[in-house]
Amino acid sequence: MRPQDMAFPTYREHGVLYCRGIDPIMPLGLFRGVDQGGWDPIEMKFAMYTIVIGAQTLHATGYAMGIAMDGKVGTEDGEAVIAYFGDGASSQGDVNEAFVWSSVFHAPVVFFCQNNQYAISEPLERQTRVPLYQRAHGFGFPGVRVDGNDVLASYAVTRAALDQARVGQGPTLIEAYTYRMGAHTTSDDPTRYRIASEVEAWQAKDPILRVRRFLEQQGLADQSFFGEVDEQARVEAVKLRERVLELPDPAPVTMFDHVFPNGSPEIDEEREQFTAYLSSFAGEVH
Amino acid sequence: MADVTATGGTITYREAVAEGIAREMRRDPTVVCLGEDIGAAEGVFKTTVGLFKEFGPRRVWDTPISEQAIVGAAMGAAMTGIRPVAEIMFSDFLACCWDYLANEIPKVRYMTGGQVTVPLVVRTANGGGLGFGAQHSQAVENWALAVPGLKVVAPSTPADVIGLMAASIRSDDPVVFFEHKGLFASKGPAAPEGHVVPLGAAAVVRPGADVTLVALASTVPVALRAAETVAAEGIDAEVVDLRCLVPLDMHTVLDSVGRTSRLVIVEENPYQGGWGATVASIVADEGFESLDAPVRRVAAACVPLPFADSLEQVVLPTADKVAAEVRRLAAY
Ligand SMILES: Cc1ncc(C[n+]2csc(CCOP(=O)(O)OP(=O)(O)O)c2C)c(N)n1
């Protein structure tokens, strides 16, 4: 991604968020439930996490049509858009509609499907009978499958697709083939629907371990480099954990914020009444 | 499913959902279930536990993620004479299949001159209080209430879940069945075999003489707690559990208001466009002479639901807010 490119993430794109320069405390505020995240999607070129499955593919399509209309597409320095989604999302009507629209409008958008082979408990076979990347052909644009656990290959394919989009060559579907190692959420128990040996087989394909081996074998990095990186990661993680624990609970009256861009008489009145109600407790010990 | 003998005759609301469906599936071989993660995973809220094991993949369909397809295909399947019970994981996602719920399903019978019926149930986990944020917490019974042709059910106890599930699945009309997320862990007496609660019969769950509290699903326990609070102050509140919005049992409400002369409606949806407005307008229309005080509605603030627990509690109706309104009316 170049600085001018726009990303439309699911709830999994923490890595992309980090690369866009967004403070990682922000999504943690969201997950901890003290705020809505709070980054500026337009400034950071990274839209809000989308939890209603698939919706972001249409947001991305519309955004791509918008920048094309603004004349920001068609040169080597053009803008491009990337939409991330899962294998499960590929069954949603919205996603298929996004494929149709981006195709007929020749929109500069890359559809990046992180195929981790499960949608909560539903296996890939419940979403598709053909490899997902092949679906693109039916919509009239190229589709490519990449080993999603190969960092360099994933980078190369994404870069090529974004560059195609920015020069005006239209959409591409990338299917990054990978595996969801953990549970879907803290309330999910994957042992109900998949076998341990499957998970073990994918453990051996750990993408981080693979780049590490590659860098070692090519002599591009040595032990001290990795030691430094590990230490840096450890320090960052500790710092982040401390910051999470310090996140303040929001003030009650903030619930009325941002419902309408310019306020509304009804909500302004509700806020006033609520503020008066709160101040009636002033001085009381809670 | 809950082993009722092992739990001393009590059952959770969550277990009651699976139990209610299972009873109907045993009784009627044309009942099938479909939805995301309802099979091997037994539902993300564990409301379909045991169904896949007992009835297998021919009658419990794990589907791709597409709410439109779940509800749209349920309609088509219902046209063949089977009785689909379709799950939409979060009621917020009814919006993803709204065409089928607003335009197709409720109008088939009407537009075919009564010749085609679609006896299906759309079940869905509804409501807030668990900190799931703006897109996974809404109480949206009022969305369905706005569409003539849909029946709207929202039980508050495990026994009612079972009894209303039976009535909903047996109903030839399409039913939207709201299961409240905040109630899943609550416990209550198990319903006897063959228990059916007819659609459109409200229940007086606490008799009282001074003020009527009308509630639905999650707000029933809220209203009951408020009634306990004001009882200590000498105010005797009656609590009516509507159980269904369509059909709406206004007879029970008007009868209660006729005795108490005061009405507080407790609803979880935002005040704007909430179901309580319908109840209030009918009481204003047909029960005006019995009223000694204005009708009050305790509803959620007109804002999207925040993630933060502390904020969510401020947005949603609470027993304290209800008790405050009851005191105000009792003073008239
Ligand atoms: C419209 C909609 N339906 C259902 C859900 C519940 N849900 C949350 S995540 C998920 C699975 C998504 O699977 P996939 O698209 O493969 O993404 P993954 O999480 O595996 O990356 C589901 C069904 C939702 N959030 N939105």
Image (cartoon, coloured by chain):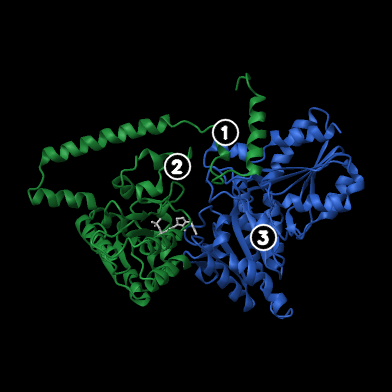
> Residue B115, how many percent across, how many down?
72, 81
In contact (CB < 8 Å): disc 1 and disc 2: no
Which amino acid is tagged 3? Ala
Looking at the image, residue A20 lies above or below residue A62? above
The crowding category of the residue bearing disc 3, from other C-alpha atoms within 10 Å (few below 14, some 14 to 19, many at least 20), is many
Looking at the image, residue A116 lies above or below residue B119? above
**Residue furthest toward the right?**
B289
**Colour in which chain A is drawn:** green
Nearer the observer, B91 or B225: B91
Is residue B190 visible from the viewing direction of this image?
no
Picture residue at 48% right of the left edge, 39% below the top = A35
Is residue A139 visible from the viewing direction of this image?
yes
Picture residue at 78% right of the left edge, 35% below the top = B326
In contact (CB < 8 Å): disc 3 and disc 2: no
Picture residue at 51% right of the left edge, 68% below the top = B61
Which amino acid is tagged 2? Leu
Give me the disc on residue A252.
1
Q: Secondary structure at mark 2?
A: helix
Q: Is mark 1 within 8 Å of ligand 1?
A: no
Q: CA distance from mark 3 to mark 2?
A: 30 Å
Residue receiving disc 3: B144
The crowding category of the residue bearing disc 1, from other C-alpha atoms within 10 Å (few below 14, some 14 to 19, many at least 20), is some
Residue receiving disc 2: A30
Which amino acid is tagged 1? Pro
Chain under callout 3: B
